[in-house]
Structure formats: C-alpha cells, structure tokens
Image: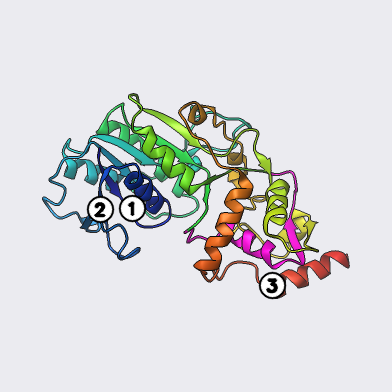
C-alpha cells in the first residue's frame, strides 16, 4: 500500500511511520524537515510547510493518507485541495479533547463535541485545541468522504514523547524517595502507548468502512494511584513511597496540570479520562500492559535524555511542599 503521512517524524507521527514501514508499505512523508533529520531513508520525503504547500508537490497518488499534524480546518482543506482526490483513504488523528464536557463515565464516540464560538480562530490554546480538532474532523469527512477514519486518542505516551508528561512521572519515580502524589488517588486516567496507537492505525487501513474510534487504554480506566503504583513497582528503587496530597492544598500553592502533568483535578477535561474503548478494541486495538510501557519509556529516557519543560515541578519545590503537607 502507498501511504502518505503528513507530519511523520515526531512522536506519534514517527511511530506511525515506523509501523507503516515495518508492515511493508511504501511511505511518503510530508514534513518541514525540522525534526528527525536523517530518519527513514527508505521513505520518500517531501519537505514543505503544510501551511504553504507548493503547487504540484502532492501530484502523486496514494492508497491512504494519515494526517497527524492537522490542527486547524484550513490545513485540512488545503491538504484536500492539493491531493485533489489522489490521497486514497483518509485517517485523521484527532483527540478526546473534542468532546463537550462534562461527559458521563464510559461515554461513547457519539457524545457531543465542541464547536468554535468564532470559526475564524486559528490560535491553538488549551481552550481552542478541542473545538479546532472537532472542526478538522468535520472538514475531513466532508472533503474525504464517509470512508474517513477518525482516531481520538487520550494521553499518548511512550518513547520519543517530547512533551514529557508520562515520562516526567517515570523519571521521578525512578529517582525514588518520597514522591508527592497529587490526589485524589482514585481519579480516572487513560493513556495509550504511541506504538500501539501507530500499529493499530496502520492495520485500521484494512477496514473497509469509515468510523470514529477512541484510542485509549482498557475500560474501566485505571486510577491515577494505580498508574503511579505501577511505576513504583516497575522502576522505583527500594524505599520509594507515594505521599498523597489533597488537590486543594496543591491548588493553593499554584500547582496544576502543567506543573504536575497528567493530573487533572482542576481541569474541565478530567471527565475525558473515562472514554469507552470498545469500538476500537473490536477493531483490533490491543494495548500492551501498562508496566511494559513504563519500563520501555524509562529505558528510552536513559538512552535519550531530555530536559523536562521548565514548568514542571522541581525537586526542591516538591520537598518544600511535602514538608508543608506533613506540618499542617
């Protein structure tokens, strides 16, 4: 199969490209050339900014197109214009952030999605990311037809995660000692290993019908406590402990999901961590065990260390907050 991957060199796109090549497909990558230089020599590389596609660049023909980097509707429209019907089956990598919250636990793909209050908005922020992705989904189906596949992942984790969310916790647990664990312990959390997402996305191309799918870990979702405890069991040195701290105590000290990634106690999108994955599972999604993802993420981080984003909670601040918690 000839597959065009739009944005195929960083994290999710990189894993999708690896999965496509491993399956024996002929891959063309459309990307800016700013990340992953030298990757995938067996693929055809088309270097361009999708916001300004040169005329004639996409004059080939493909059996399928996978769009990993479409964030605003204009980009999806421009891609459809450039392909002019030559892109084959279309897969759009979206997000569970499209949903209009609150949603009930176990919500399906038919739950209401957000809409932009201003259709002209293109700035991607925490408030606009979800409705922009939802708008992109509508454009994808309108322009590429009902065979379009919409994939809505939750938190994507694993090797090459440049956002360092899951990796932040893996590395913190691996250092051991007393760990500040943001409550509530029983808060739901769903993740998907990028490699499982990628392998399944490529296999999904064999499915004749279109559809929308939640690419998330099994239901019911595990808790944030179970997530951290799995990390302690897999990479925590002897003596590692989790100290659960109440959300209000942390909020008073300015902590949020940027400082403590994956934590959503004050996030309107906390409900989105309880999506029903049954449609994706019926279509072949098979996530690997959580502890395997933990171990392999840690091993990758050792080989390819990245500085955590500056917003992350630093060790000295963690120690200070723990001391204040114990002294309350």
Binning the other alpha carbons within 10 Å of mark 2 as few (below 14), some (14 to 19) or many (20 upward) gives some
Q: Does 176 appear in magenta?
A: yes
Query: To which residue does mark 2 refer?
Result: 43
Residue at image position (25%, 58%) is 49
User: Depth-wise, is mark 3 or mark 1 nearer the camera?
Assistant: 1
For the magenta stretch, what is the residue range? 160-187
**Contact, mark 2 vs mark 1 (Cβ under 8 Å):** yes
Disc 3/disc 1 C-alpha distance (Å): 34 Å
Answer with the quarter of the image where residue 119 lies.
Answer: top left
**Contact, mark 3 vs mark 1 (Cβ under 8 Å):** no
Left or right of 208, for residue 58 = left
Q: Does 185 appear in magenta?
A: yes
Residue at image position (69%, 68%) is 175
Q: Earlier in the sequence, mark 3 or mark 2?
A: 2
Query: To which residue does mark 1 refer?
Result: 8
Residue at image position (63%, 59%) is 170
180 or 125, nearer to the observer: 180
Disc 2/disc 1 C-alpha distance (Å): 10 Å
235 or 212, nearer to the observer: 235
Answer with the quarter of the image where residue 131 lies.
Answer: top left
Q: Earlier in the sequence, mark 2 or mark 1?
A: 1
Query: To which residue does mark 3 refer?
Result: 315
Left or right of 324, for residue 278 = left
């Amino acid at each position: 199969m000839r597959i065009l991957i739009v944005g195929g060199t960083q994290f999710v796109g990189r894993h999708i490209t690896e999965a496509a090549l491993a399956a024996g497909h002929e891959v063309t990558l459309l990307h800016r050339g700013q990340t992953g230089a030298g990757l995938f020599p067996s693929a055809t590389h088309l270097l361009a900014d999708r916001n300004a596609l040169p005329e004639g660049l996409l004059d080939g023909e493909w059996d399928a197109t996978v769009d990993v980097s479409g964030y605003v509707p204009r980009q999806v429209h421009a891609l459809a214009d450039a392909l002019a019907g030559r892109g084959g089956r279309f897969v759009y990598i979206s997000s569970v952030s499209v949903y209009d919250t609150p949603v009930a636990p176990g919500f399906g793909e038919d739950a209401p999605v957000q809409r932009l209050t201003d259709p002209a908005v293109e700035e991607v922020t925490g408030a606009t990311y979800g409705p922009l992705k939802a708008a992109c989904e509508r454009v994808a189906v309108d322009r590429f037809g009902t065979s379009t596949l919409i994939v809505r992942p939750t938190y994507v984790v694993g090797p090459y995660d440049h956002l360092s969310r899951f990796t932040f916790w893996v590395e913190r647990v691996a250092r051991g000692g007393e760990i500040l664990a943001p409550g509530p312990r029983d808060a739901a959390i769903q993740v998907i290993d990028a490699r499982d997402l990628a392998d399944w996305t490529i296999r999904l191309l064999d499915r004749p019908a279109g559809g929308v799918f939640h690419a998330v870990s099994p239901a019911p979702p595990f808790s944030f406590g179970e997530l951290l405890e799995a990390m302690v069991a897999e990479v925590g040195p002897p003596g590692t402990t989790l100290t659960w701290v109440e959300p209000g105590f942390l909020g008073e000290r300015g902590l949020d999901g940027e400082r403590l990634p994956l934590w959503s106690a004050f996030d309107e999108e906390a409900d989105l961590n309880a999506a029903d994955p049954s449609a994706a599972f019926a279509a072949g999604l098979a996530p690997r065990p959580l502890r395997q993802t933990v171990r392999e993420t840690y091993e990758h981080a050792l080989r390819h260390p990245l500085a955590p984003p500056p917003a992350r909670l630093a060790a000295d601040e963690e120690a200070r907050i723990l001391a204040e918690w114990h002294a309350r």
